Amino acid sequence: MFAIVAAFKHWRQYLEGAKFQVQVLTDHRSLEYFTTTKQLNRRQARWSELLADFDFVIQYRPGAQAGLPDALTRRSDMRPKDRGPSLMQEHNPGNFQTLLKPHQLRLAATGILTVKSDITDKIRDALPRDPWTSLLLERVHLGSAPPGFAINSMNLLTYQDSVCVPEVDDLRLLIVQDRHDSPAAGHPGRRKTLSLVRRSFFWLGMSKFVHSFVDSCETCRRIKAVRHKPYGHLKSLPVPPHPWSSISMDLIEQLPPSSEFTAILVVVDRLTKMAIFVPTTNELDAPKLAKLFLRHVYSKHGLPTSIVLDRGSEFTSHFWRSLSTLLGIENHFSSAYHPQSDGQTECINQVLEQFLRGYSNHLQTDWSDLLPLAEFSYNNAEHASTQLTPFFANYGYHPRFSFDNTDPASLPLFPAARSYADQLKQLHEYVRGELDKANRRSAEQFDKHRLPSPQFQPGDRVWLSADNIRSLRPTKKLDYRRLGPFSVSEVISSHAYRLQLPPSMKIHNVFHVDRLEPYVANTIPNRVQPPPPPVEVKSDLEYEVEQILDSKVDHRYRDPLFYLVRWVGYGPDHNSWEPASNLTHASDLITEFHTANPTRPSPTPCETPPLSSFFLGGDTVMTRS
């Protein structure tokens, strides 16, 4: 509207008192109603008073119908200062003339990218020594070569202006390394690397060679993001046979203090989905956990046969493992960095946090008082998997909710479960059937976004995702995407594998298959891969030992025992003598070396420490002091 007012002010002498009605075209439809609007602000009122002296009408016209822009629709001060040629003149096809043909451009690129002259000389000298290129040279000289083959001015055999590379002296390897590994190339993928090589060179089987080179490039595997769907179809835990025979437990920690509580223990029955919320503290250890379990689970539902747990220290402690063994409870721990192993409890944690978020006070100091209501609210709500409330699935009836004058005996039951209400056994069979159906539905949807799990065997090498593994580098943005490669030491299941990690990596060594990527071994002779990066050890960097080769004693040093070490990813020229004190994280390799070489110098055997005992939960445990 401001533009219309400005236009009438600028051309007032032409428009005021005109014998014709002024037509104003705009692509802003709402301006059509300006003259009929009943409510105007002060600025619009001033504009309306100014425009009252003119006879005009505002008409809407879409911008697509406005035609080509003209000078009136463009600001004059935006014209280029150099007064250069207009875009229409600059891009007029008549202003262009083809000076170089495509094959000439390809030749120029060959001249620029054919790298170093020593490689050119090596190719020229190797041409007669390769059966394929020597035969082609002979046929070119005789004039009977296949179409496209020729000899250029540098006395090199070419095919369609690309230099033919013989299979001699690793020339092909050197060329692909230059087009892939160099900073100017930047470790491109298959297609781009092949395009860079094809620009200047040609040989039979080039695509296969380049694909093999790129697929087995360890640097690419470390630095590049995964572009395929995650591995591993959904593998649901088996449905328990009866209520509270299998449960899951988890902790919600780091909550604001509430009546001296700072955490919540969440216990869920995996069949009926009934949950127990217990307030506790962040300092919960295994003995305290056992007391809470005794008070809130065992006293009401007896001992379960299995418990699904994450890898919190209170669950993985020696005390809890020993107690579970004595009670006949099988612990199922989640694999490292894979919370989906106990997705049920993780979802219930979200529901609980949502409840507390909605009802806690401003200071968030009363959440512990809200836990009983949160527990009732969750257990009295219908579960999507079973189509029943956890309370009804566990006890066979609905609890009285708030004020309700309805006779409990006349309350309608879940239609599909009406015939099972009198017999809990049949009701639980119904729940199991519903859970089986829910698992199948979940798997059907989940597997659409997953690839089948690759089957690894002990000894296979794999890459490990670095997403959740801390490093000493300044930012995760520029850190390696994958670590390794590491060897598979044990097959836990079709979806979980134990890896042979360096002892210095203080993380659990069982991983879900979606954390792993298959390692593609190098099949190109004489190719040397870059060494792997060091691993983090107690806020420092340490290189991984591959093998202990020898040992010696040098009494000039305070630590006289030395080992000859071969480092992972480094050649024999990097082998070094290291004092035994530097190899505390390679004790397994040292033991393996001395077992195979009992006559070589070894550490002085230590005396076996005497046995001592201490009391743990009423049981006497023997240990070495």
Image: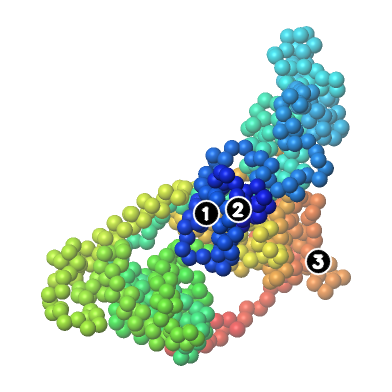
Label 1 close to label 2 by CB (< 8 Å): yes
Mark 2 touches mark 3? (CB < 8 Å): no
> Could you tell me how far apart the alpha carbons at marks 3 and 1 are, in whole angstroms?
95 Å
In the image, residue 330 above or below residue 478: below
Percent x, y of residue 269: 33, 72
Instruction: Identify the mark nearer the N-term, 1 or 2.
Output: 2
- Look at the picture and state if 144 lies above or below 174: above
Q: Which residue type carries mark 2?
A: Ile
From this view, report whether residue 369 is shown above or below residue 93: below
Residue 540: which quarter of the image?
Answer: bottom right
Please report whichever mark, 3 or 1, sits nearer to the chain's N-terminal start.
1
Quadrant, the C terminus: bottom right
Q: Quadrant of residue 565?
A: bottom right
Label 1, on which residue?
A: 31
User: What type is the residue that disc 3 sits on?
Assistant: Val
Q: Which mark is residue 360?
A: none
Instruction: Describe the element under mark 3 as helix, strand or loop.
Output: strand
Q: Secondary structure at mark 2?
A: helix
Q: Earlier in the sequence, mark 2 or mark 3?
A: 2
Residue at the location (52% across, 76% down)? 313
The secondary structure type at the circle numbered 1 is: helix
Q: Quadrant of residue 520?
A: top right
Report the amino acid beneath label 1: Leu
- The one of 450 and 204 positioned closer to us in this rendering: 450
Residue 167 showing in the rendered view = no
Quadrant in which the N terminus appears: bottom right
User: In this rendering, which labeled residue sits more in front, label 2 or label 3?
Assistant: 2
Q: Which residue is mark 2?
A: 4
Which of the pair 305/141 is nearer the observer? 141
Residue sitting at x 36%, y 56% = 442
Tag shown at residue 553: 3
